[in-house]
Structures are given as C-alpha cells and as structure tokens.
Amino acid sequence: MGRKTILKIAQIDPLLVEVALPLEAYGKLRVGMTGMVIPEGLKGRYSASITVVDSVFDAASGMFGVRLEMKNRRASIPGGIRCQVDFPALEAMAPRQAKLK
C-alpha cells in the first residue's frame, strides 16, 4: 500500500529570494548586505537581507547563486513569483531576475 501526500506546507514569512549573478559580481556581496526586491506584477520595493553567497560557480553559465530573506508578515506577497533584485553594492550592474520561494 503506497502513501500519498495529502498536505504540503509552504512558509511565506520570511520569503526566500534566489538570484543568479555573473562572475563580475563575485566578492562584492556579503552575508548581511541588503538588496531591493521588486516582485513582478505587484507594486512596491521590499528590502531583503543576503543570507547565502555561493562559493561554487556554474561552469556552463559562469554564474553563482545568492539567497536573500525577505519579511512578509502580512502574507501580502505570494511565493513563487518572479522578481527583480537591485543590489546597491552593484550599482553599475542592471537589476537581476530572481524568484521568490
């Protein structure tokens, strides 16, 4: 007799933001720094804190990952939507596409 999942729990406070950045951004971001998250289709900009900066690159794309944590106490921002992230420390670079988890 197989078991079937009947419930899946998702945490939406805080939301996790996953973004891939190019090699030239490596070394310019650190845990604790902030980024501004702009969710697609929603108004507003939201501050998020960097919690992880990957030290392993994807050889095929030359990219590395950064994870941010964004407070969502009122659950006003749904998880799973695309967003852009603007890092003040990378002012010369364009905002990066990301996804809220």
Image (spheres, rainbow, N blue to C red):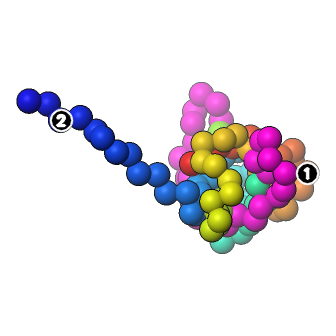
**Which quadrant would residue 88 be assigned to in this image?**
bottom right
- Tell me the number on the disc at residue 92: 1
Task: Between residue 88 and residue 10, name the one nearer to us.
Answer: 10
CB-based contact (under 8 Å), mark 2 and mark 1: no
Q: In this view, does 31 lie above or below 15?
A: below
Q: Where is residue 37 in the image (x, y as percent from the top left)?
A: 76, 55
Disc 2: which residue: 3
Q: Quadrant of residue 70?
A: bottom right
Q: Which amino acid does label 2 sit on?
A: Arg
Instruction: Count the numbered circles shown.
Output: 2
User: Who's the residue at 38% across and 46% down the image?
Assistant: 8
The percent position of residue 23, horizontal first and vertical second, equals 71, 44
Secondary element type, mark 1: loop
Q: Position of residue 85 (x, y in %)?
A: 77, 51
- Horizontally, is 88 left or right of 47 in the view? right
State whether residue 11 is above or below residue 64: below
Q: What stretch is highlighted in magenta?
A: 38-62
